[in-house]
Amino acid sequence: MNNLVTIEKITILGGYTKDGIEEPIQKVNITTGEILVLVGPTGSGKSMLLSDIELLASADTPSKRTVLINDAMYEGCRNEIIAQLSQTMNFVMDTTVENFLHLHASSRNISSDTIFHEVIDLANTLAGEPINHKNFITTLSGGQSRALMIADIALISNSPIVLVDEIENAGIDKLKALQVLSDKGKIVIVASHDPVIMLMAKRRIVMRNGGMKKVLSTNQKENELLHELISFDKNMFSLRESLRTCGTIEIT
């Protein structure tokens, strides 16, 4: 990470639920390379917690939480250390994928001679349909856009913290995407309804009524179940791709 303090951990200090009651979990530490999943029904507060982290809250948001970086308030620009992948990605620049990646790499003083090929190659291992470097970014599908941004964050962006909102809706290889970011030493925090994503992480925060209710660690039985869910998920992915590309499924 160029010109940035090394991020070893994030600490979330608890605030209050929607009812104004002190939330049950008052402190959570998240360390480098960890994938942490936020779980709970719609309206439980997952997006608010992501927002608190993105804003590096200091008891100044509706939840009254505080977010510390390396046990202290962060003095720099939060945009330098946090990247966010929302449920929708919309580009406004009218330029090609190649030019976009060259511009981003050069803005971070990274040699862009070969990096854009590496980014596109990685993106194409995540996306359902290939991305060509001559494609205009405004014509990319939602899945292509998310795959490109994940590869960009992994290889070009030096943001050590990545926030992801419902990656299961992106039309990409979600497990590989999260693993790519984690392998780069980034702290990855994901809000998800997907049981595969919930169980692939070592820990998950259970959200209720706007508050952090529990922090659970994935146990041995859940790990065993995860292998079954991944197999089922791969079959579903294969069936979906067959229907998308051929319009039919061959049943033997």
Image (spheres, rainbow, N blue to C red):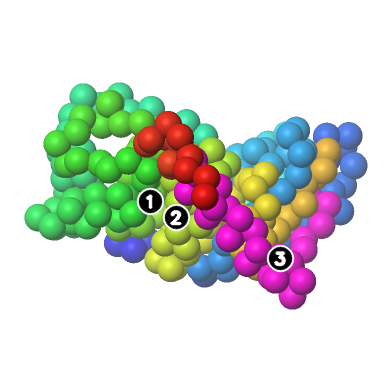
Tell me the residue that label 3 is attached to.
Answer: 225
Label 2 sits on a secondary structure element that is: helix
The residue at 45%/51% (across/down) is 173
Q: Number of numbered discs present?
A: 3
Residue 130 x/y as whole percent: 27, 43
Q: Earlier in the sequence, mark 3 or mark 1?
A: 1
Marks 1 and 2: in contact by CB < 8 Å?
A: yes
Of residues 109 and 190, the one drawn nearer to the viewer in this rendering: 190
Q: Is residue 164 magenta?
A: no
Any part of residue 77 in sight: no
The residue at 72%/48% (across/down) is 39
Within 10 Å of the Cα at label 2, are there few (<14), some (14-19), or many (20+) other Cα atoms?
many
Query: Which is in the foreground here, disc 2 or disc 3?
Result: 3
Marks 1 and 3: in contact by CB < 8 Å?
A: no
Query: Which is in the foreground here, disc 2 or disc 1?
Result: 1
Q: Amino acid at mark 2?
A: Ala
Of residues 173 and 150, the one drawn nearer to the viewer in this rendering: 173
Q: CA distance from mark 3 to mark 1?
A: 24 Å
Within 10 Å of the Cα at label 1, are there few (<14), some (14-19), or many (20+) other Cα atoms?
many
Tell me the residue that label 1 is attached to.
Answer: 126
Position of 167 compared to 152: left or right? right
Position of 112 compared to 71: left or right? left
The part of the image, by quadrant, that contains residue 226 is bottom right
The part of the image, by quadrant, that contains residue 168 is top right
Residue at the outermost front position: 252
Q: Earlier in the sequence, mark 2 or mark 3?
A: 2
Q: Quadrant of the N terminus?
A: bottom left
Q: Which residues are magenta?
A: 212-240
Q: Amino acid at mark 1?
A: Leu
